[in-house]
Amino acid sequence: MTDELSRQEGDLPSLVDQARVRDMPGTRRGLRTREALVAAARRVFERDGFIESRLVDITAEAKCSTGTFYTYFDSKTEIFTAVMQAAQDDMMNPGMPHVDENPGNTAAILAAGNRAYLEAYRRNAKLMLLLEQVATIDPVFRQLRLTRSQAFAERSARRIAWLQRHGYADPTLDPVMAARALAGMTSRMAYYAWALEEGWDLDEVVGTVTQLWLNALGVAPDKPKSDS
Amino acid sequence: MTDELSRQEGDLPSLVDQARVRDMPGTRRGLRTREALVAAARRVFERDGFIESRLVDITAEAKCSTGTFYTYFDSKTEIFTAVMQAAQDDMMNPGMPHVDENPGNTAAILAAGNRAYLEAYRRNAKLMLLLEQVATIDPVFRQLRLTRSQAFAERSARRIAWLQRHGYADPTLDPVMAARALAGMTSRMAYYAWALEEGWDLDEVVGTVTQLWLNALGVAPDKPKSDS
Amino acid sequence: MTDELSRQEGDLPSLVDQARVRDMPGTRRGLRTREALVAAARRVFERDGFIESRLVDITAEAKCSTGTFYTYFDSKTEIFTAVMQAAQDDMMNPGMPHVDENPGNTAAILAAGNRAYLEAYRRNAKLMLLLEQVATIDPVFRQLRLTRSQAFAERSARRIAWLQRHGYADPTLDPVMAARALAGMTSRMAYYAWALEEGWDLDEVVGTVTQLWLNALGVAPDKPKSDS
Amino acid sequence: MTDELSRQEGDLPSLVDQARVRDMPGTRRGLRTREALVAAARRVFERDGFIESRLVDITAEAKCSTGTFYTYFDSKTEIFTAVMQAAQDDMMNPGMPHVDENPGNTAAILAAGNRAYLEAYRRNAKLMLLLEQVATIDPVFRQLRLTRSQAFAERSARRIAWLQRHGYADPTLDPVMAARALAGMTSRMAYYAWALEEGWDLDEVVGTVTQLWLNALGVAPDKPKSDS
DNA sequence: AATGAATGAGGTTTCATTCAT
DNA sequence: TATGAATGAAACCTCATTCAT
């Protein structure tokens, strides 16, 4: 039982696999131009949204010609993939501190996982909003998100089932559905907090969300459920 | 304590107020044309999405000319408002059965509220997906959704606070934030179930979600929390 | 044995069938605009060639906006089809005078057919050059020309076979291949005379071509071959 | 009276003169690169046509960079000239066997000339189609073809005039125009047979075409016209 | 002599909106 | 109130050619 809950919806584990990007340029100059384009695209996308942004805005921001864009990308969608790609490492490695994986420590484990996730979300809030938008338009990205959140839920589901089997969690819950629901709750809170509104206190969100997870699963702070 | 939890994110209480539509046509013929346009727009929007749909598709579907469209609406956004408007009644009146509002009956109340909400969502799943899309584009609709979910949360928050005050719910939770989180969880589950995937069993979803609400709030099935 | 030789390569009998044009506009105004576009396109095509001409040249010539073009045509190829369509009547009805279809009159029949064809070609020389160009680009038009010239050759072939059977023509010739060759000769002469060069005398061309047909087929001016 | 009829439209006698190519590269390496480019260009042109082919396709096929192209050629047109140039030898030396140039042998001479021409055409059919296309676009190549076919016609015309003067051919024909017509017929047959359709038997085509030449000119198989 | 990234003019196409009928 | 042709700004994309390395 390792970091089963340390990743949640919003990470981008499979973006690489599903939306292949074309071969990287061979020369150093080409690499610099490509990076400039990706950075420019991120700024423009975050500023104007995916739909409202124009390729010419991106090339202008990157200080290159429209033709150059097509040297590296085939479409707005493709450079969006590259932007997400570049942000992936940060989203994928939320810098979760080590926590003792002892079942009696479930509260701390969940807290750490949620904090890591929410912090990563906050760092990339504009990008997440962007992904939300693109997912409503492009079925590929919609499917991507779905697959990903299913994968996350599965891990949480395994942890929940384990807790249930050992008497640490409410045995009446369906582990898969509960996992989906709670992961969805967390991601939605992140969305409210940093994609839409601004300024909720991170600690407060972490505290509430973790508490709700614990309560919802029926995990007693320090002893197996069956003991009560 | 009335139906504080019976409405959740996804309803459209304030659509009328924020996105004004122009005056209704005077003649009977005009009324019919307008209705045909709204119905056609709903079909086209649901089929193609808001962005991908063209006014000419809508007018073709409504069997009228493009010019006629502008007799009744000023823009694509305006007819979208009208479509949402027309769907509002169903979304607003989820047909919730009467439930005894006794605090000891909290489980049944929450179950009924969740069921009503989820059923309404399922009936209007495509429209909800649509709203999701438009909200990512149009700040008016984004704000609308936010305001609405805040309003819902406030009602849930009041109920939670009431339960806490009377010893029926975990007193350590922030009622406002918990309300946002749990309402978000429910709406996200509805989104997964009927906007993205297909075929989850309604009863199961209702059961799981309600159980999670109850657990999360620490509501004992039949006795105040303080009694335990 | 009627006008078997009265049509040759260059006519457009099947253009209608193969490259369907979209429905005609309903209103008188629309009809006028469409006609203006087709007329403008013919002028521009004849002036600049198909490849070199731009849609904007056509719309400028027709004094309408670029958008209007797309109300009536989907592409440059489609309006080219329409231009050919419009020229078809003239090419199809070369105004051949009545000639006595008596076998002893073969020379006069061939002369009349060739004259009619060559005159029609001369009237539409620029258009024929254009078709030549488009045929080298677009397989549809290439196939069209091939099918058409095959059809023409078949008719000539029947006439030749008839002449052979009755002893009026060289029986050693393959009627089908001879027909293809002689029709090709005539069309090539028309091409040289009026598509590339300018100023060959029509009567001279008709005379030479007819004489070559007669000689080539071995048709004696006034008596069956077998009599010699 | 030498090989006056052994060359016809389709050969490229004057390509060198009219469309100058730049100086050959000095080094062996450069020569190899240039040759690779020309060979690649021929393949690409034959595959995609002149208009549809892109320089980048050619350089990719030649396994060199786009920049290198401009070391050897100034434009797409120029490399096309070079491709034709390279094919010229084959087209120019159709490998015509020696035939006794005795006037009584006219049939054999014509047959040999036609066969040599048609075989060369068949070997280079795709290239001829290509030339056809470029000629419709580029006035230089159009003029080239015209000049060439005029030159050929002149030679045939001289032979025809000679035959007429000595009573071997129909004296009523205009030798120049008849030559143009018959050469055009032959080239058109080659075009039908191997540029458009496929599978006509070479011997049949040679036989028919030669027969038509003989008949058309009124050349008796074995005796002067005046003897008949 | 070779490279290949950068350029940008030049084309095509779309579609919300207007307006004369 | 209804019509539907006309508009044209605004986006997209291509590719021959240049040029710094």
Image: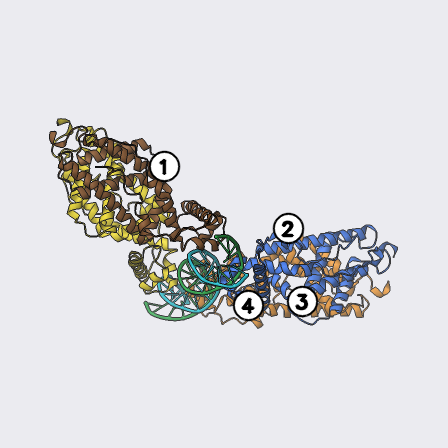
Chain colours: A blue, B orange, C yellow, D brown, E green, F cyan
Q: Amino acid at mark 2?
A: Gly
Q: CA distance from mark 3 to mark 4?
A: 30 Å
Q: Earlier in the sequence, mark 3 or mark 4?
A: 4
Q: CA distance from mark 2 to mark 1?
A: 58 Å
Q: Quadrant of the C terminus of chain C?
A: top left
Question: Is A127 drawn above or below residue D227 in the view shown?
Answer: below
Q: Which mark is residue A192?
A: 3
Q: Which mark is residue B199?
A: 2
Residue denoted by label 1: D198
* Label 2: how many Cα within 10 Å (few below 14, some 14–19, many 20+): few
Position in image of residue B128 (x %, y %): 60, 60
Q: Amino acid at mark 4?
A: Glu
Position in image of residue A45 (x %, y %): 58, 65
The front one of C141 and B58 is: C141
Q: Is residue B116 visible?
A: no
Q: Amino acid at mark 1?
A: Glu
Q: CA distance from mark 3 to mark 1?
A: 69 Å
Q: Secondary structure beneath disc 3? A: helix
* Label 4: how many Cα within 10 Å (few below 14, some 14–19, many 20+): some
Name which residue lies at 52% across and 61% down: A69
Position in image of residue A131 (x %, y %): 61, 61
Residue denoted by label 4: A61
